[in-house]
Image (cartoon, rainbow, N blue to C red):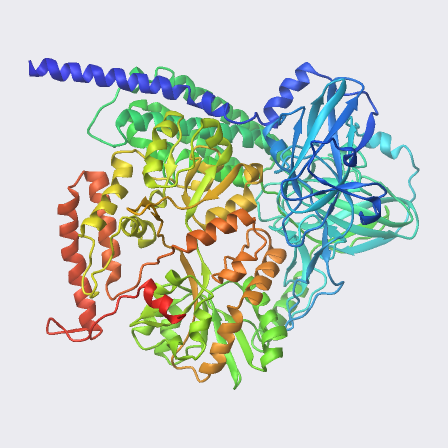
Amino acid sequence: MKRLNLFSIFILVLMISTQTLIQVSAQDEEVARLVEPSYSEIIDQWNAEYSMGPSDYNESFLLADQNESSTAELVSAEETNGYQNSVVHMKDGSQSIIELEVPETGLYQLAFDYYRLNDGLIEPEFSIKVNGEYPYYESRRVIAKSLWTNATDTFPVNDYGHEMIPEQIALAQWNSSFMYDPNFEQADPLLVQLNEGNNTLEITHQAGEFLMGQVTVQTPKPLMNYASYISQWDNQEGERLIEIEAEKPASKSDSYIRPIAQKTISVHPYDPTSNLLNTFGGNSWQRGGQRVTWDIKVEEAGLYQLTLKSLQNTKQKAPVFRHIYLNGEIPFAEMKHYRLTPSDSWVNQTLADDNGEPYLFYLNEGTNQLTLEVDISLLTPIVESLTQMMQEINQLGLQLNQLTGNRIDSNRDWEIMDYMPNLMEQFDGWISQLEADYDLLAQLYDQDVTPPDQVSLQVIIDRLKTLKEDPNDLPNNLGELSQGTGSVTQAMGNLVVELQKGPLQLDQIFVHQTDAKLPAANASWTDVAVSKAQEFYYSFTQPNMDITDVEEGTIEVWVGRSQQYVEIMQAMVDREFTEETGIKVKLSVMPNESKIILANSANQQPDVALGVSVGQPFELAIRGAALSLNQFDDFEEVSTRFSEGAFLPLMLDDQAYGLPETQDFYVLFYREDIMNELGLPVPDTWQDVVNILPELQRAGMNFYIPLSSTAGSKPFMFTAPFIYQFGGEIYAEDGMSTAIDSEEALAGIKFMTDLYTLYSIPLQVPNFYNSFRYGELPIGISNFQTYVQLTSAAPEIRNSWKLALYPGVEQDDGTINRQSTGSAQTAMIFSKTDYPDESWEFLKWWTSADVQIAFASEIQTAYGPEFMWHTANLEAFSQLPWPESDKDIILEQWSQLKEVPKIPGSYMIEREISNVWTDIVFYGANIRATVDDSIIYADREVRKKMTEFGYIEDNQVVKPYKIPTVETVESWGD
């Protein structure tokens, strides 16, 4: 009877599992219906159904003629900054709706006139609907790129004689641009399908502030080939040579496409004693659609060759591609997708055909403009193939997880084909597609030595073939298939990122006639040897930003950031702080924090340290090496600049030994487009999260929490919020033991582990950014790093995601406890400083709102959107050029910031909470018994460290330890 019951249960489980897999197998199709199709999908359908509009069709429509449903403000021609007609003012989500009348049903291009009004890096953005609908997903975000230039023609020089990047300014002018996809993955402007007669065009503001003039509707113009182009002129022989320094372009599409200092005699200009900004581009000029324009001043009109002195050794052994424009237009078809070969040293690449015959370009007398645009469109088919395949493999991983109950058992045998009869066909399809992708990549790259991108693709193919050989072992090999840093999907994601890069570094551009003699690309070996000897000699005499002795009366500041940051900081200090106070400050790059402890032991510590980790001030303070900031009369006033909870790890015995400098945040990220299509509310509490999980998982999706990002130890920043939100504490009131065995703390730990054991959220997510971007995890808790990635490297979904508050636990009074961690880096003064008052003045200046706002703007303008500065100064943060809705969420979440305080031995408590999680989630251990065992180890270590620092003697507490609290910090401002 017992055997019969067990058999019945087995059959029932098999039926449920099979039904589950049938549901999951349709998930890809269901998810695909949540948003509009991509342009690549819809254009194939349109090309089959429609032809292009009438040849040479070109008609303009004024947005000022918008209909009465529009909300955009009209601006008269007199107030349009030089535009000849009335325009509309786009801001705050305003809409402009106009009627477009075309003579035939077909496919058309759209171009827009616009004038940027806002400061900062936020570009004008809008969405487009045609006849009431988004024609494809990319139409949700159209970027109207600004043009930038240097504020000065010469580069400023710092105190060490090195050239610095000048201030960047956006050109105040009307621009016109076609409609492109946000990633510039398509080679041509996007097409829209319009019907004969009237069509409605709805333009909705999304970001920035700008004026819009007219919309031009036209059919694409075919490019002539080179033979047709050159037949218009006769060649003129000559030796005229024009040399253009690439580091000084006339304009560029992004402020952070920047010059680079190359200390080699092979580039021009060169100085062995200093760093000159003498080359241009590199990694800052690698994203699709990035344009740079140089002025070419020609004394005599005629035909000229173009030669680029270039270096491309970043993307090893792989060519890069550029669209090349002359006076705003691609002169002939061969200048589209022009291929530039890789090189390990500087080379002169004359633009030429496949046989090496140089192209000739007609230049007018006077000023001509040469524009190079990064082109990644040839690799788009491979990128789209890999992206689709990642989603399919992740779906397979989800099916396997559901089949195995999310538990790996190496002793259990599976007959996977009984559950997934089409599995082998799926693997064969992936491998076949990847092999076709490999052939295409090899054709595009065409290198004698196999580039790393091709090697990566071949590795992916080989690993899929290996996994296919033993499908029954797939449940035990999910780490190789779809989970973890070494998985196939992770390798695909990494390859997609690399394929979308096209870096190129330029030294000079030569415009020359046929018989001109070009300078050699590289210096002779004798010149190189002499120059290197000179550089070696001057390295002993020239000052730099490394840690060195400072002159008397100068504050020495070590900064735990790269030289890019320190150069801008030093410039600000010199022109503002020293100018105003007379206090000299020398900033030095601190290679790593361990040097602080060593320097303090050797009595060679600085006066101030910036950019140190949040735990460092406590570790130094308890050893007498850090200065208490409470001794300064205006400390209480200064402390109000920051979140109270950010001070907790910086305190010892109610004294603060550091100021928050930057501050992290953990908030809820969610894909608004997907959540709306699923009809799911944005969760406000953890119970809300539990409620939406079944529907998410039914659609093949899930919820993410930061605990899933680490395979090893779980730090306080991920575990403490659960304990705090359920009313628990990490430490006992006297600080001599842990308090994780309280009922409240146990409730938090139980829920933290139930999310995995009961609610099946993913155990490990190697890259939430990728999973969020591709819709596999459309909602989850993450931090500043994810925010930077999404805003700077995921333009295609920029208007499709939003932030919300960290889910919390509802209290008896109806409020929601959302306490979470979020500290980042700090600033501190050393106790041995000879200049405590001057050091304090410097810290006050550096952490002030005006200075933090200015620095945030300068660093991002110079180095790009990924250099966002998350200042801890609340007033400064509120004024950063971030979306207001995002700042509101972050500031509200910061009001419940509660960082974990430090006590001697706290690292052991952190480790034991992590061990508790592991024992419960992986081994099904009893929560109370596991916590009780962990407390023994944690408390033993805490008492040992308390004894070491004099709080306990002979097993007796001789000096009370005060646990830092938010209430103590709040009392400073009373």
Residue at the far bottom in the pictured view: 552
Towards the viewer: 266 or 109: 109
Residue 10 in the image, given as x and y percentages of width and height: 19, 17
In percent of width and height, residue 189 lies at 70, 32
Q: Nearer the viewer, residue 776 or 901?
A: 901
Say left or right for 598 vs 347.
left
In this view, the residue farthest toward the left is 1
The correct choice, above or below, for 19 with respect to 128 in the image is: above
**If the image is split into quadrants, where does the C terminus sit?**
bottom left
In front of the other: 689 or 869: 689
| In this rendering, position of residue 412 left or right of residue 238 | left
Above or below residue 934? Residue 221 is: above
**Residue 242 falls left or right of residue 501:** right
**Residue 771 is drawn in which quadrant?**
top left
Q: What residue is at 57 percent from the left and 60 percent from the top?
A: 856
Farthest front residue? 813
